[in-house]
Image (cartoon, rainbow, N blue to C red):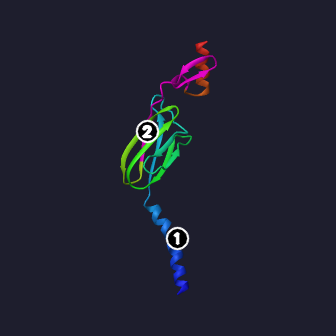
Amino acid sequence: MKAESLLLVLALLVLYPTSLKSQMVSVTGKVTDQLTGSLIRDLTVLEKNSGIGTISAFDGSFSLLLKPGEVELNFFSERYELSTVSFTLKNDTTFHVPMHALEADRFKRGRKERPREENSGSLAENRARNAKSR
């Protein structure tokens, strides 16, 4: 009798987490700068109702495991406006989120202050642009 009870408890411990995970649905996507199209890393993605969140990777990608139902995703960082996406989550979902840079998002390079879009691109492009402006 004890062996059967122990076996039942072990089976429940093994199967219960698996059944919980099967109730979760993935939300994945990429975040980009709307103006430049560049991928945004280190952007916070937070599901408001559950408090589950993540940070976008170096390639702008993010992934969350959430329970199906009403979802409100907030996308934000100190350099971009808050963007909110609300939807009913039923199945695995993938989408693209373009972000709007804040107006005050300007960079200082040397003695000159330039708009953000002028500072995007490769190092070679930036050096060529700087050489032309001298």
The answer to whether 100 appears left or right of 130 in the picture is left
What residue is at 52 percent from the left and 70 percent from the top? 14
Rendered image: mark on residue 97 = 2
SS at circle 1: helix
Where in the figure is residue 8, as x and y percent of width and height? Answer: 50, 78
What residue is at 39 percent from the left and 48 percent from the top? 71
In the displayed image of the protein, which residue is found farthest to the top? 134
Q: Does 12 appear in magenta? A: no
Question: Which amino acid, mark 1?
Answer: Val
Q: Residues within 10 Å of mark 1 (few under 14, many from 20)?
A: few
Q: Does 118 appear in magenta? A: yes
Q: Nearer the viewer, mark 1 or mark 2?
A: 1
Where in the figure is residue 44, as x and y percent of width and height? Answer: 51, 41
The quarter of the displayed image where residue 111 is located: top right
| Residue 63 drawn above or below residue 24 | above
Where in the figure is residue 130, as x and y percent of width and height? Answer: 60, 18
Where in the figure is residue 31, as x and y percent of width and height? Answer: 47, 39
Rendered image: mark on residue 38 = none
SS at circle 2: strand
Where are the magenta residues, as a range?
A: 94-119
Whole-Å distance between the Cαs marked 1 and 2? 38 Å
Q: Which residue is mark 1?
A: 14
